[in-house]
Image (tube, rainbow, N blue to C red):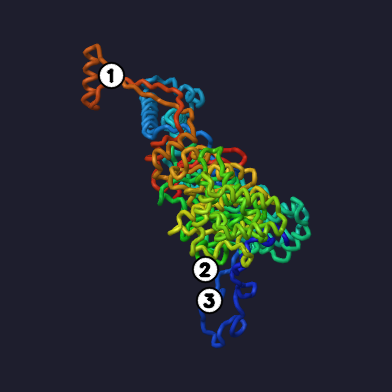
C-alpha cells in the first residue's frame, strides 16, 4: 500500500537494514500444549515406571506471546491533561492545593477534643450535671423493668449509656477532626494503591477492537488487527503506523479497499516504513506512541510548581516541539543524555510510524543513538561514510542556493541585530552560481567555488567564454558586476573565499560532490518519514562544524516551508547550537510553527549568542529549559522572559508584651524561664505583591543537580509556567 509509512523516501538513498519482522517463531504444538507422546498412548514408558512431567516447549524456545502486555498498554486510560503532563495512566489532581492542617496542630486538637468528651461523660456519670440526661430513659421504660435484678432493665440502661457516650464521641470527633487523622495516619494512608484523587475513567470503547474501522465498514481488517493484537504480534509502533495509514484513508488520499487489502494480507506488519523496520534496536526512554509523548522526568513536589503538576510525569510531544525547544546548561548538565537523546529516539519511532521526519545533528560520538536506528547517517570528514551532504540543499535555483550558502558561510558575521541579514553575501554568491550552472549544468564544487571567489583569472575567463558561446547576456552582466567588485574596499568575496577554504581541506575531499558521480543526501527528503543523523567533525574542524550546522539549519528552514505534505511533523535537533544562532536563523525558527515543524537547540551558555539576539531567540522558542549550573547572567535572561506573577506575601511581626500588674509580671517571668523567650504578640500582614516566577539567583543556585526549570507552550497557544523537573525520575 502506498501510504504515509510505505512510500519510497526519495533523496535519502538509504539501504534497508534487515530486521526481524516479529517475535521468534515457536514450533507448533497440539492444542493441549504438549508434544506428541514418545512411547505408548500417554507417553509413559513400556515398563510403567514414573517419569518427570513432560516440558511444554522445547529448550531455549521463548514462551508463546499472548499480547496481554500490549493490550494492557493500549487500554490504559490517557485523560486530557495540561501541556507537558505524561498522560499514560495519569490521575488528574485539583488545580489548587487543598488546605492541609499541620500534623502537630491536628493531633493536639484531637487530643484536647478527646479530653473534653471524657470530662463531659465524667460529669454526667458522677451526677455533677444533674440527672436530666436520664429523663428520656425513664420516659421510655416501664416501671416493672426497674426491679434491681431485672436482666432486661440492665441491658436497656447500659444500651442507653452507650448511646449517650456515642453521641458525645461523635460530637467531639467532629470537633477534633478524628476522621482526618484516620485518613492521614491510619490504614487508608498505608494503602497507597488507592490514591485520594479520582481515577481516570476507562475508555468507552475497546481500542483493541478498532471501532473506527468497524464503523467505516472495514470489519475484516479490524478483526485481523484485533487477532494479531491478542496473539502478541502487534507492537506500539505497528498500532501507530496503521492508525496513521487510516488517517490517510479518512482524508481521501488512499482508498479503503487498498488499506483493507494491505491489512488482510500483512496484518500488524501492514504499511511498513521503507526501511522495513518495526521498532528501534534499543529504547532508553519511556514512550507512548498513542499520545506521541516521550517522558523526560518528573515534576518535583515543590511549592513553586503548580499543584496540578506536582509529582506528575513530564513529557514532550510534537504538539510542544512544534513551538521549538531551547535548552541551556553547562557541560555535564545532561543536555544530550536526558533531553536530546530521548527526543531523537521518540521522533525516530514517529518516523517508523509514518508521522515524522527527523534530522539529528551533533559531534561524532556524542551518543545520539546507534547507527542502525537511522535510515541515513552522514559522517562528514569520515572517509568511510556511506552518505554525502548536498552543499546546495538539492535546489536548482541559484538564488535560493546562494541564500542558503551565504547564511552558512557568513551568517555569524552579519550584524547581530534582528533586522539585519546577509544580502550582500547572497548577491556575491548568486553572481557566480548562476553563470556556473548555466555553463556546466551543475553548481561548482568546493575547490571551484573557492577559485571563483578568489578571482582566479583562469576559471573566470573560462566561465565568460562559456556564457558568450551560450548567448547568456544577462548572466554575463552578473559576471561583469562580480569582476568589477573584486578588490574594492568592502567586497565580501574575500571573506566568503576564506570561509569556503575551511571546507577545502583534505578531510573533506570526498564530500560535497556536485559532479553527479554520487547523489548526496538533501533535506528535500523531509517530505517523507526519514530518520537522518549527521555527525560533524568537531575535533580539529570546529569552525567548519559550526558552518555546517548553520548550513543544515538554513536548509531545514527553507525545505519545510515548501513541503507539500505538512501533516508530517519535521524536527531538527542540534546538539550544540554554538555559533548557529543568527538573525536569519531566528526568523526561520519563528516561521516553523506554521509549517508543522520545530527545532531543538542546546547551548552551554547564552553567551554563545550575540546579546541583541538572546531576547528574540527566547521569544521565538515556545519551550525553554534552564538546566542546573546556569550562570546568574544567563538566569537573568530566563527570568525576564518568564516574567512575574502575583503572589501572596505574609509579613509576620513579633511585639514584646509588657506586663502592668505584679501577677502578669510573675506569669511572664515563669514563661521566660520555661520557654527561654520573652512573651510576644504576633501580628500577620497579608498582601498581594508581584514577583519573578524564577529569579536569576534561584536559577543559578536553587536548581539541584539533575534538575531543570522548563516552561512549555504548545502549538495551540496553551502554556505551562516554569516547572522544576527532575530529569533523573
Q: Give the label, 3 or 2, closer to the camera.
A: 2
Q: Which residue is mark 3?
A: 59
Q: Residue furthest bottom?
A: 47
Q: Which residue is mark 2?
A: 384
Q: Are marks 1 and 3 in contact (CB under 8 Å)?
A: no
- Secondary element under disc 2, as helix, strand or loop, is loop
Q: Give the label, 1 or 3, closer to the camera.
A: 1
Between the C-alphas of marks 1 and 3, the distance is 83 Å
User: Where 659 sits versus 171, above or below?
Assistant: above
Q: Which residue is mark 1?
A: 656
Residue at the spot x=41%, y=21% of the render?
131
Q: Where is residue 468 drawn, in percent x and y?
A: 69, 57
Q: Are marks 3 and 2 in contact (CB under 8 Å)?
A: no
Q: Where is residue 166 drawn, in percent x and y?
A: 45, 31
Q: Does residue 464 appear in this view?
A: yes
Q: Earlier in the sequence, mark 3 or mark 2?
A: 3
Between the C-alphas of marks 3 and 2, the distance is 42 Å
Between the C-alphas of marks 1 and 2, the distance is 82 Å
Q: Residues within 10 Å of mark 1 (few under 14, many from 20)?
A: few
- Secondary element under disc 1, as helix, strand or loop, is strand
Q: Does residue 169 appear in this view?
A: no
Amino acid at each position: 500500500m502506498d501510504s504515509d509509512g510505505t512510500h519510497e523516501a526519495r533523496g535519502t538513498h538509504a539501504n534497508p537494514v534487515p530486521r526481524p519482522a516479529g517475535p521468534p517463531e515457536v514450533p507448533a504444538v497440539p492444542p493441549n500444549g504438549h508434544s506428541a507422546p514418545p512411547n505408548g498412548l500417554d507417553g509413559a514408558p513400556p515398563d510403567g515406571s514414573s517419569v518427570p512431567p513432560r516440558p511444554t516447549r522445547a529448550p531455549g524456545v521463548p514462551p508463546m506471546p499472548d499480547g496481554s502486555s500490549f493490550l494492557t498498554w493500549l487500554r490504559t486510560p490517557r485523560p486530557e491533561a495540561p501541556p507537558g503532563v505524561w498522560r499514560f495512566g495519569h490521575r488528574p489532581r485539583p488545580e489548587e492545593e487543598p488546605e492541609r492542617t499541620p500534623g502537630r496542630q491536628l493531633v493536639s486538637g484531637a487530643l484536647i477534643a478527646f479530653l473534653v468528651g471524657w470530662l463531659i461523660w465524667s460529669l454526667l456519670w458522677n451526677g455533677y450535671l444533674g440527672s436530666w440526661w436520664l429523663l428520656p430513659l425513664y420516659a421510655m421504660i416501664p416501671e416493672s423493668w426497674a426491679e434491681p435484678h431485672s436482666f432486661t432493665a440492665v441491658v436497656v440502661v447500659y444500651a442507653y449509656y452507650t448511646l449517650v457516650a456515642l453521641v458525645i464521641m461523635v460530637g467531639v470527633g467532629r470537633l477534633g477532626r478524628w476522621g482526618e487523622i484516620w485518613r492521614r495516619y491510619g490504614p487508608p494512608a498505608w494503602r497507597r494503591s488507592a490514591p485520594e484523587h479520582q481515577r481516570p475513567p476507562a475508555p468507552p470503547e475497546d481500542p483493541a477492537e478498532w471501532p473506527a474501522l468497524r464503523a467505516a465498514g472495514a470489519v475484516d481488517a479490524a478483526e485481523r488487527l484485533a487477532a494479531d493484537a491478542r496473539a502478541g504480534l502487534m507492537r506500539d509502533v505497528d498500532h501507530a503506523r496503521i492508525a496513521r495509514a487510516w488517517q490517510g484513508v479518512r482524508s481521501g488520499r488512499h482508498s479503503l479497499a487498498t488499506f483493507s487489502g494491505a491489512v488482510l494480507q500483512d496484518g500488524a506488519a501492514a504499511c511498513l516504513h521503507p526501511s522495513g523496520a518495526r521498532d528501534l534496536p534499543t529504547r532508553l526512554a519511556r514512550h507512548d506512541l498513542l499520545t506521541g509523548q516521550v517522558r523526560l522526568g518528573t515534576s518535583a513536589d515543590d511549592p513553586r510548581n503548580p499543584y496540578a503538576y506536582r509529582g506528575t510525569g513530564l513529557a514532550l510531544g510534537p504538539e510542544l516541539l512544534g513551538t521549538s525547544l531551547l535548552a541551556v546548561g553547562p557541560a555535564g548538565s545532561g543536555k544530550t543524555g536526558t533531553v536530546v537523546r530521548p527526543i531523537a529516539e521518540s521522533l525516530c519511532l514517529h518516523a517508523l510510524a509514518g508521522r515524522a521526519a527527523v534530522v539529528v545533528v551533533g559531534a561524532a560520538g556524542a551518543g545520539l543513538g546507534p547507527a542502525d536506528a537511522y535510515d541515513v547517517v552522514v559522517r562528514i570528514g569520515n572517509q568511510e561514510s556511506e552518505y554525502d551532504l548536498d552543499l546546495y540543499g538539492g535546489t536548482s535555483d541559484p538564488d535560493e542556493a546562494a541564500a542558503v550558502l551565504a547564511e552558512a558561510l557568513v551568517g555569524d558575521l552579519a550584524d547581530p541585530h534582528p533586522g539585519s541579514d546577509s544580502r550582500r553575501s547572497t548577491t556575491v554568491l548568486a553572481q557566480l552560481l548562476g553563470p556556473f550552472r548555466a555553463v556546466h549544468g551543475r553548481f561548482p564544487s568546493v575547490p571551484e567555488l573557492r577559485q571563483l571567489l578568489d578571482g582566479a583569472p583562469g576559471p573566470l575567463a573560462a566561465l565568460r567564454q562559456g556564457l558568450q558561446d551560450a548567448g547568456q547576456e544577462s548572466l554575463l552582466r552578473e559576471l561583469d558586476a562580480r569582476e568589477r567588485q573584486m578588490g574594492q574596499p568592502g567586497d565580501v568575496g574575500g571573506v566568503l573565499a576564506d570561509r569556503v577554504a575551511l571546507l577545502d581541506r583534505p578531510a573533506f575531499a570526498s564530500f560535497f560532490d556536485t559532479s553527479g558521480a554520487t547523489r548526496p543526501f538533501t533535506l528535500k527528503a523531509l517530505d517523507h518519514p526519514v530518520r537522518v543523523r549527521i555527525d560533524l567533525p568537531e575535533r580539529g574542524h570546529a569552525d567548519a562544524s559550526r558552518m555546517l550546522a548553520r548550513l543544515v539549519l538554513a536548509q531545514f528552514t527553507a525545505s519545510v516551508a515548501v513541503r507539500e505534505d505538512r501533516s508530517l511533523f519535521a524536527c531538527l535537533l542540534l546538539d550544540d547550537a554554538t555559533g548557529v544562532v543568527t538573525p536569519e536563523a531566528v526568523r526561520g525558527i519563528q516561521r516553523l510553527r506554521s509549517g508543522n515543524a520545530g527545532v531543538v537547540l542546546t547551548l552551554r551558555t547564552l553567551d554563545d549568542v550575540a546579546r541583541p539576539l538572546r531576547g528574540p531567540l527566547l521569544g521565538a522558542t515556545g519551550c525553554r529549559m534552564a538546566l542546573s549550573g546556569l550562570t546568574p547572567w544567563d538566569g537573568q535572561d530566563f527570568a525576564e522572559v518568564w516574567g512575574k506573577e502575583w503572589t501572596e506575601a505574609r509579613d509576620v511581626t513579633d511585639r514584646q508584651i509588657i506586663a502592668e500588674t505584679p501577677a502578669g509580671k510573675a506569669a511572664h517571668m515563669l514563661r521566660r524561664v520555661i520557654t527561654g523567650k520573652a512573651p510576644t504578640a504576633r501580628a500577620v500582614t497579608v498582601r498581594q505583591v508581584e514577583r519573578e516566577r524564577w529569579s536569576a539567583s534561584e536559577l543559578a543556585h536553587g536548581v539541584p543537580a539533575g534538575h531543570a526549570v522548563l516552561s512549555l507552550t504548545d502549538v495551540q497557544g496553551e502554556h505551562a509556567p516554569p516547572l522544576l523537573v527532575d530529569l533523573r525520575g
